[in-house]
Image: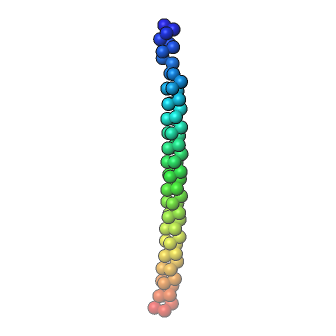
Amino acid sequence: MLQRKIETCPSNIELSQFNKRLVELFDQLNIKSDENRKYFSLFNTVTDAKTLFNQEQNYLNEINQTYKKTNG
């Protein structure tokens, strides 16, 4: 029974491989997280620009309507 328990414990090589793979996965996660952060930032920037352009268009339409009313 004790022999079975000893055999179920991972060896130093297995622990080393596991640790190496864990570090690799953590690095991949960090890279993906940075990539996602960049995309969110880009999306927010584009959304802000779209909002500002829509506001500008509304102002121009309002100016145009006011001009047509006064000169129409």
Q: Furthest-left residue in view?
A: 72
Instruction: Give me the residue at 51% from left, 90% from top.
Output: 70
Of the pair 39 and 46, the residue shown nearer to us: 39
Residue 51 visible (yes or no): no
The answer to which of 32 and 8 lies nearer the viewer is 8
51 or 25: nearer the eye?
25
Across and down, in percent, residue 46 comes to 50, 64
Q: Residue 45 at what x, y percent from top left?
A: 53, 63
Residue 59 vs 21, above or below: the answer is: below
Compared with 38, 6 (above or below) is above
Image coordinates of residue 64 in percent, x first then y, are 48, 84
The correct choice, above or below, for 3 with respect to 61 in the image is above
The residue at 52%/83% (across/down) is: 63
Query: Is residue 14 among the parts visible in the rendering?
Result: yes
Task: Name the residue at 48% across, 7% down.
Answer: 1
Number of disc labels: 0
What residue is at 48 percent from the left and 17 percent from the top? 8
